Amino acid sequence: MALLSTHGLTAHYGQFQALFGVDITLERGECVAIIGANGAGKTTLLRALAGVLPNRADAIVYKGEPIGDRPADAVLRRGIAMVPEGRKLFPSLTVEENLLIGAHARKLAGPWSLEAVYGLFPILKERRHGPGTALSGGQQQMVAIGRALMSNPDVLLCDEISLGLAPVVIRDIYNAMPQIRAGGAAVIIVEQDIGQALKVADRVYCMMEGRVTLSGPAAGLSREAIHNAYFGAAA
Amino acid sequence: MNWLDTIVQGILLGGLYALFAAGLSLVFGIMRLVNLAHGDLIVLGAYLILLIVSLLGLSPFVAALVALPLMFGLGYGLQRVVLNRVLGEDILPPLLVTFGISVVLQNGLLQGASADTRRLPTGDIGVASLNLGPVTIGVLPLLTFASAVAVIVLLNHMFYHSALGRSFRATSDDPVTASLMGIRPRMVFAQATGIAMMIVTIAALYLGMRANFDPAIGPARLVYAFEAVIIGGLGSLWGTLAGGVIIGVAQTMGAAINPEWQILSGHIAFLLVLLFKPRGLFPRAFD
């Protein structure tokens, strides 16, 4: 049985339908990338998984339990943590407080603690008493990832963690991914950069206009197939 | 006229106004909710303490200790059952609802306790004073001010150095992202209002021991509290204490010149601060 799966998942923003029956699965310890153009519904999918967008209970099944109708705080308590798009650090909190609040509701012994996160991103330890908003974009992204890890999640959702960052910084961030996966968490990353996604993921889902148009192991997908799924095949 | 004495009395009076204001400041800082029933809730607290004093024969200080958890429960329930439903993008519904609560409280107290003025028994402490050369300090006003400082210190410590305060600040920054951390914003709001009602209880204790009260005096206490919060800068707890002191000093100095000017002087001081520092003396860096 999959760790996490969706079944005909839909999502609406008012009159606008953003997802049309999405079915994906995530196995324990796996890393899945979701790629697609702007507006394909990638972020909406992650927000639904995190409980920010309400859904039918059985649209999302986690460890055998239907959780589609659970609010975000209940989803986090069950072990699904999110690194939100745009990092969303709390400006009133210092770097260390931003990390600590990640463990506010789910204090679980596990691979991740304040020390472990500082070990993963040493620069944060130097800046820990400063406000999170005083950091560079890449450092802020490290805080956002560390904050999500602090709850020792079984599933880590990463929304566009390379957005707006310089290539060298993106490399630093993705260099942390093997260590994160070694901690045991299964990871879903939403990524615009196809090359980056194929490099880090075991499997890939490609989305277009609210539907999954292609899926398969990252190693086995041809450039052409991805191109067609990304922009729509001229069929 | 002894100006030093006047200023000292004003500062001590400011402690009472800071107690009125601290709860309002906390709630506004966390959920951007202006509770128009705040003054009436202080009056309700005074009646509750009076009730406990007369039923159980306790001293007002012990009665206030008994009232603290009751008022926390009242605030928690009020937020969960009523105020959480009206919080949102539109700031008008919470204003209307708390205004309605204010009317209900005033009339409910009028029905239940009549329009007679009441006072909490103070015993010897109400008239005791310390003679310090040119200045004579009443023990009760000194206790009021010390309580205000203690409340602000404790609130600041809770707000900036505890997990609870961290969840308050995070929720105030961004409730959606806070919920991704497993925080329930509605629960946080209820806890904050509960704590605000505990401060209201302390304010009610000193209000009731210092002077007479009746069911109609709530709105004026709300105005003093609101002015103290605005003078200090929204969201700054030490600013709220400073705001209370400024109003207190302005009122006693006005009264020293002409007793008719007491209330007016406080309002003028408020308007002057607004004129030169529209965001208050210690505004938060971001909003």
Image (cartoon, coloured by chain):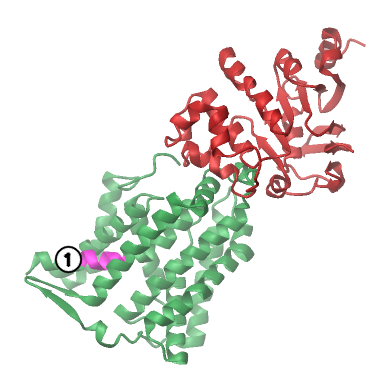
Chain colours: A red, B green
Judge whether residue A114 is colored magenta: no
Residue B251 visible, this angle: no
Q: Compared to A95, does B97 lie above or below?
A: below
B118, above or below B103, in the image = below
Which region of the structure is painted magenta?
B10-18
Towards the viewer: B246 or B184: B184
Residue at (68, 39) in percent of width and height: A81
Residue beneath the point at 37% across and 80% down: B61
Q: Which residue is mark 1?
A: B8
Left or right, B283 with respect to A20, comes to: left
**Which residue is rendered at x = 63% and y = 36% of the image?**
A149
Q: Please say whether residue B157 is visible from this viewpoint.
A: yes
Residue A79 is situated, as x and y percent measured from the top left of the image, at 72, 43
Q: Quadrant of residue B116?
A: bottom left
Q: Position of residue A152 (x, y in %)?
A: 66, 40
Q: Mark 1: few, some, or many residues within 10 Å (few <14, many ≥20)?
A: some
